[in-house]
């Protein structure tokens, strides 16, 4: 039962879920499916009614739209030419799963085994694979790695541009093995990405989980609800206060509060509520509920560089956007057949490669795109172009998130410290060089007029690092700010309970102790599936 805008001053519930993003939608669905437990969800954004959310190529519009996007900006980074970095994050039902690039990537088995080695019992690959499978409705059917019949539809790319085929063949020619399933037995190789789409429409967490659950009378969803603080009685979380327009509303949670506001807003809300480094909070006049030094620490993200090419043939999305006739044709293709260029994801072809032969598993990701751009707000290039975004996928750089003030409407100060680790700089330069080797192979070289960026003047390792520092971008995979663990800087334990507090869990990408080797939406949904089982196994009827 979805309501928003009722004349209410307080709400009583069993479970309070803060944030209706990738994790929050899962939690709302799973915790309410018994039909008895009252579940209330608070989402700062609006309903996912914008049509561009649901058309796959609409990513190009939602990535900059402030109506569905927080449009965060970081502090300037010393290692990236003193630039701030734009961070798109979803502010809408479905969260970032409603505005992301639609790629379904889990990461490597070793990522989760490493979590277990860090002291997080129950989070090895063997432990989490059943939850990936539980969530999944795989177009290619069920097998040892994939599930069928789950809420999240995972589909094959419908539109296969000749540029994509040529890039894959050139990758194989350069020694990268062909891989038709990055989420199967091995991640290494080159091939097509799979998408979180169903019948060529985005299958966000809101579509997959929340919308079906909203038919239940025991589920309440409040949109436009900016949570100002979590309420505590002693060390127990008992609810939250949110602002909805001019109204201030209190929610009281009988069982638990689940914080699923994402890697930026979850630590932000903990800090606003007095949970975090005591000295930092006291300086800003925030009453300290619990001194927890790890809140806002351990910030990680994927940082990449773009190699952009001028195309010899008008096969790119740039060409489509310059032609009203082609736009009409593409619209009709999509409306009638659910085919054509409007069905594509942000990247269509991927590759996972090793920076050096002695590296145990791939540490570089390619995201090949049949369009090109510089800054997101500037739109696509005016020429026929395509690009390959490359990034190290296991960065060693760590950043921080801090309160600017005690005002919940003011975003926190985010300093990702991109490229502060020498290994990240070295791996990113290697990624650019490997990508250039692929681009020199005949199949894709046939389509290339020239390398628009970095361009031939950037040739040495120092040149390439300078280019990456001056023009690189976030791949928008922020994690780690409420990390799971048992060490003094951990924020949650392996059951995702906040250390030292009762009745409060964090369930989203912020709990990842280390960044997974690839995109983060599928792992975030897995985390929530597992968290729901942890809670239902412990909660009394």
Image (tube, rainbow, N blue to C red):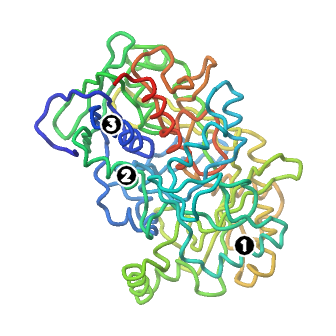
Q: Which residue extends farthest bottom? A: 325
Q: Is residue 303 above or below residue 312?
A: above
Q: Secondary structure at mark 3?
A: loop
Q: Earlier in the sequence, mark 2 or mark 3?
A: 3
- 194 relative to 431 in the view: left or right: left
Q: Which residue extends farthest top? A: 234
Circle 2 residue: 206
Circle 1 residue: 168
Q: Nearer the viewer, mark 3 or mark 1?
A: 3
Rounded to the nearest whole Å, what is the CA distance between mark 1 and mark 2? 33 Å
Circle 3 residue: 34
Disc 3 vs disc 1: Cβ atoms closer than 8 Å? no
Q: Residues within 10 Å of mark 2 (few under 14, many from 20)?
A: many
Percent position (x, y) of residue 391? 68, 54
Q: Is residue 232 above or below residue 431?
A: above
Q: Nearer the viewer, residue 101 or 305?
A: 101
Q: Residues within 10 Å of mark 3 (few under 14, many from 20)?
A: few
Which quadrant of the structure image shows residue 283? top left
Q: Which residue is pictured at 44% across the width and 53% down the height?
A: 151
């Amino acid at each position: 039962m979805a309501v928003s805008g009722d004349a209410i001053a307080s709400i009583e519930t069993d479970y309070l879920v803060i944030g209706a993003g990738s994790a929050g939608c899962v939690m709302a669905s799973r915790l309410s499916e018994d039909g008895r437990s009252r579940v209330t969800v608070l989402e700062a954004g609006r309903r996912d009614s914008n049509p561009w959310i649901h058309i796959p190529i609409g990513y190009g519009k939602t990535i900059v739209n402030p109506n569905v996007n927080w449009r965060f900006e970081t502090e300037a980074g010393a290692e990236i030419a003193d630039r701030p970095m734009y961070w798109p994050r979803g502010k809408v039902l479905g969260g970032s799963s409603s505005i992301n690039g639609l790629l379904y990537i889990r990461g490597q088995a070793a990522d989760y085994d490493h979590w277990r080695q860090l002291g997080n019992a129950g989070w090895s690959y063997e432990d989490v694979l059943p939850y990936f499978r539980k969530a999944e409705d795989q177009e290619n059917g069920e097998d040892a790695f994939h599930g069928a019949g789950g809420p999240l539809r995972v589909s094959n790319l419908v539109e296969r541009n000749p540029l994509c085929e040529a890039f894959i063949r050139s990758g194989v020619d350069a020694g990268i093995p062909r891989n038709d399933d990055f989420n199967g037995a091995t991640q290494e190789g080159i091939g097509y990405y799979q998408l979180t789409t169903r019948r060529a429409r985005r299958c966000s967490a809101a579509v997959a989980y929340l919308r079906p659950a909203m038919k239940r009378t025991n589920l309440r969803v409040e949109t436009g609800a900016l949570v100002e603080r979590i309420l505590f009685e002693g060390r127990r979380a008992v609810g939250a206060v949110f602002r909805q327009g001019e109204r201030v509303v209190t929610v009281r949670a009988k069982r638990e509060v689940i914080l699923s506001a994402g890697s930026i807003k979850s630590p932000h809300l903990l800090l606003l509520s007095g949970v975090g480094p005591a000295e930092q909070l006291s300086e800003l006049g925030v009453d300290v509920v619990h001194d927890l030094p790890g809140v806002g620490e351990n910030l990680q993200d994927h940082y990449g560089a773009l190699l952009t090419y001028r195309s010899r043939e008008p096969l790119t999305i740039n060409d489509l956007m310059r032609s009203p006739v082609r736009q009409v044709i593409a619209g009709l293709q999509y409306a009638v057949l659910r085919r054509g260029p409007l069905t594509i994801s942000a990247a269509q072809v991927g590759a996972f490669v090793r920076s050096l032969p002695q590296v145990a598993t791939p540490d570089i990701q390619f995201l090949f795109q049949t369009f090109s751009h510089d800054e997101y707000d500037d739109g696509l290039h005016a020429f026929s172009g395509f690009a390959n975004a490359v990034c190290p996928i296991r960065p060693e750089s760590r950043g921080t998130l801090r309160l600017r003030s005690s005002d919940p409407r003011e975003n926190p100060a985010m300093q990702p410290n991109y490229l502060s680790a020498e290994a990240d700089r070295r791996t990113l330069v290697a990624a650019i060089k490997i990508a250039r080797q692929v681009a020199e192979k005949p199949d894709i070289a046939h389509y290339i007029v020239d390398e628009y960026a970095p361009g031939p003047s950037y040739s040495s390792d120092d040149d390439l690092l300078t280019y990456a520092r001056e023009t690189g971008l976030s791949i928008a995979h922020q994690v780690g700010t409420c990390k799971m663990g048992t060490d003094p800087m951990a924020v949650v334990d392996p059951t995702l309970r906040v250390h030292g507090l009762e009745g409060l869990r964090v369930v989203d990408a912020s709990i990842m102790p280390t960044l997974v080797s690839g995109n983060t939406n599928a792992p975030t949904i897995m985390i929530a599936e597992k968290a729901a089982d942890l809670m239902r196994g412990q909660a009394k009827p």
